[in-house]
Structures are given as C-alpha cells and as structure tokens.
Amino acid sequence: MATGTTTPEERTAASQRPSTRARLDWFALVPYLILIVLAVAVVSLNPKLFSLQVLETKLNNGLPLMFATAAQAVVILTGGIDLSIGGVLSLGAAIAATQMGVTWQSIALCTFLILLVGYLRAKGGTP
C-alpha cells in the first residue's frame, strides 16, 4: 500500500469517531444573553444600581439566604433530606429578635440557644 493513501474502511472509521474539537452550544448562551440585556436595561433606568453602597446593602440582605442555601446544599449532597431548615431559621430569628440586646452576654446567649436548637434538631429531637 502506498504511503498517504487510505482505504474506504479507514475513512469510514475516521468519520465515525467523535470530534475532538469543542463545540459551542449556542442555545446554552441564551440565559446569559438575557441576563446581560436585563442588566443593561435596569442600569439604564437606575444608574446608581452598581454603586458600592447599593451592592453592599443587597449582599447584606441576601447573606442569610445564602447561608441557608449552603446549609441545605450540604444536607442534600451528603445524601440526606431535611426540610426543617426553614423552621430552624425562623425559630433562631425569633429567639434573636426577642432576646438579643446590645451586650456581649445577650449575643453569646442567643448564639448558644440558636446552636442548641440546631443541634437538637440535627440529632432528631424536637426543640
């Protein structure tokens, strides 16, 4: 066989192999494009949206939800399911709202009580 020639069987086998080049899925980019268009529209209506003060306020308001999401993700990723996270967060917020003062003792007491509620719930007890 001469060098550089291929048989029809070799050409067929080569055409059936998956391509090694990465393909760009244009449909997967649609949510990102929509997000960019909406962000541009919102910023054009309110230019102060991306100021440091507004971003800090948004992050501070969303931080408890981020913590709850991370906690629920850990529970799900370890193979369990726990639907009581909402109740534990609500009970913790109620304890903090009614008992927490400006002294470090009240903050420490509330932190201890909230952690105790979480521990009892994790062990299967009812707080």
Image (cartoon, grey):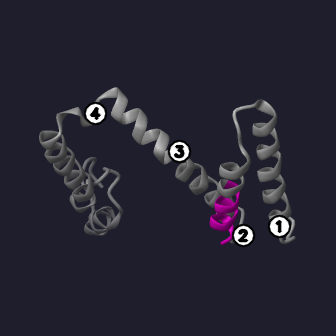
* Range drawn in magenta: 83-92
The image's mark for residue 80 is: 2
Residue 117: image quadrant is bottom right
> Which callout, 4 or 1, points to the residue nearer the camera?
1
Give the Cα separation between the discs numbered 4 and 1.
Answer: 42 Å
Which of disc 3 and disc 1 is earlier in sequence? Answer: 3
Residue at figure coordinates x 20%, y 55% from the top left: 34
Q: Is residue 57 left or right of residue 72?
A: left
The image's mark for residue 50 is: 4
Check if mark 2's residue and mark 1's residue have beta carbons within 8 Å: no
Give the Cα separation between the discs numbered 2 and 1.
Answer: 20 Å
The image's mark for residue 127 is: 1
Image spot of residue 24 (x, y percent): 26, 53
Residue where numbered disc 3 is placed: 63
Provide the secondary structure element on which disc 3 rests: helix
**Residue 86 part of the magenta segment:** yes
Disc 1 crowd, CA 10 A, few/some/many (<14, 14-19, 20+): few
Magenta stretch, overall SS: helix
Q: Is residue 79 above or below residue 97?
A: below
Which of disc 2 and disc 4 is earlier in sequence? Answer: 4
Give the Cα separation between the discs numbered 4 and 2.
Answer: 39 Å
> Which callout, 1 or 3, points to the residue nearer the camera?
1
Which of disc 3 and disc 2 is earlier in sequence? Answer: 3
